[in-house]
Amino acid sequence: MPVLLRGQDSGNWSNPGAALAEEERGRVLSAANAFLRQAPQTITSVRAVRSAGGLHDFYSEGDYWWPDPKDPNGPYIQRDGMSNPANFTAHRELMVRLSIQMPALTAAWQLTRERAYAERAVEHLRAWFVTPATRMNPNLEYAQAIHGRDTGRSIGIIDTVHLCEVAQAARVLLRGGALDDADARGTQAWFTEYLAWLTTSKRGEQERDTKNNHASCWLLQAASFAALTGDDGVTGYCRTRLQQTILTDQLAPNGSFPRELARTKPYSYSLFNLDIVGVSAQVLSTPGYDLWAWRGAEGRSLEQAFRFLMPYVADKSTWPYKKDVEYWNDLPVRQPSLLFAALAYREPSWIAVWRRLDPDPTVAEIIRNHPVRQPLLWLGSA
């Protein structure tokens, strides 16, 4: 990845790894020290009584579905962009908890090499993916169910986008020798099985073939899990798909994502989708295969996508489209892809923007759409 010289108020990023470590050290260690005191908790600790699955099956309910005032006991109806707080979210919340705590602990170990951080991070992996009594089944057959309509839907696969940074953290631990053979085999076996389900099941194929941020999230998951499991075939497929399908189909020549702009939360969805494709480029790129440099028809490029949105990240008041129906005041936040793009395109001013944004939002919906939070784990990833 290209490096930057000192610029504006971005700091000295001529050595990105060292600069990022200095930037993140206090934040990471503060969080990790708190997480050392909290034991892992998996979905088996909260039974989902409305689920058609069992104790080990992840379950969630569609966010934008509500009781029908004309038929309160009948099938739910949709209110796009409006989350129903009465729907079951406990399993998703536990997965988000995992995705916050385990990568932060791993980043702390990466910074300090203090064994306690790695040991607690590995405990999370063991509980979720290895131990028979607490592990999650490696599929998402019962995600985003709708009362009276569906016991689970393919679009529920977006819920496991929060496992992408968990998988990346596991790679860091594995490369650093912090995973013993049993935990490494067990974790990789779980992600191998889940990746097979993601790429071959009917629900997985349906999610892959969507046309918006859901397809982007499918790709980031497949790419991240393939990186952990060493599946070169899926990795190659994801590289091709990111260029020829995701970016080609979703990007307008001006760098916008028209399908996200058409939603009731156009700012949020545009930021989210940009973050997902940016992190995908980060995990899939190698020194000899730079997806950040991709160029498509009619001027489409990943660079153009960032150049389109960055002015509105720097100053949201200039946003020329509709305001989001929810959480308008809570965005933007410090998405790692903004940093990765700044380094790739030699834009010190973007680092300055990234540095002043909130790295640890507290609003649940914003956290849910901020699945990658530890850029240390991704910068210069193998």
Image: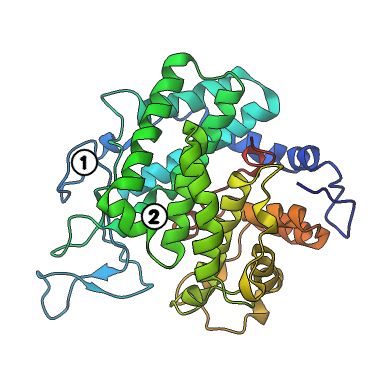
Q: Quadrant of residue 62?
A: bottom left
Residue 235, given in percent of the width and then of the height, sits at 51, 43
The reply to whether residue 263 is visible in this rendering is yes
Residue 22, given in percent of the width and then of the height, sits at 78, 39
What's the residue at 57%, 63% (across, down)? 274
- Vertical placement of residue 63 versus 182, above or below: below
Instruction: Please state which amino acid type lies under the numbered disc 2.
Output: Ile
Quadrant of image for the C terminus: top right
What's the residue at 53%, 54% (across, down)? 240
Q: Quadrant of residue 312?
A: bottom right
What's the residue at 45%, 72% (across, down)? 326
Mark 1 and mark 2 in contact? Answer it, CB < 8 Å: no
What's the residue at 16%, 47% (across, down)? 49
Q: Would residue 15 appear left or right of 162 to someone viewing this image?
A: right
Q: Would residue 25 appear left or right of 275 to someone viewing this image?
A: right
Give the residue pinned by disc 2. Answer: 158
**Looking at this view, is 205 or 94 the one in front?**
205
User: How far is mark 1 from mark 2, CA to CA?
Assistant: 21 Å
Residue 366, given in percent of the width and then of the height, sits at 50, 59
Q: Secondary structure at mark 1?
A: loop
**Looking at this view, is 11 or 328 the one in front?**
11
Instruction: Please state which amino acid type lies under the numbered disc 1.
Output: Arg
The reply to whether residue 100 is visible in this rendering is no
Residue 166, given in percent of the width and then of the height, sits at 49, 38
Give the residue pinned by disc 1. Answer: 47
Q: Residues within 10 Å of mark 1 (few under 14, many from 20)?
A: some
**Looking at this view, is 330 or 334 the one in front?**
334
Q: Between tags 1 and 2, which lies in front?
A: 2
Q: Would residue 25 appear left or right of 278 to someone viewing this image?
A: right
Disc with the residue nearer the chain's start (1 vs 2)? 1
Q: Secondary structure at mark 2?
A: helix
- Vertical placement of residue 131 versus 351, above or below: above
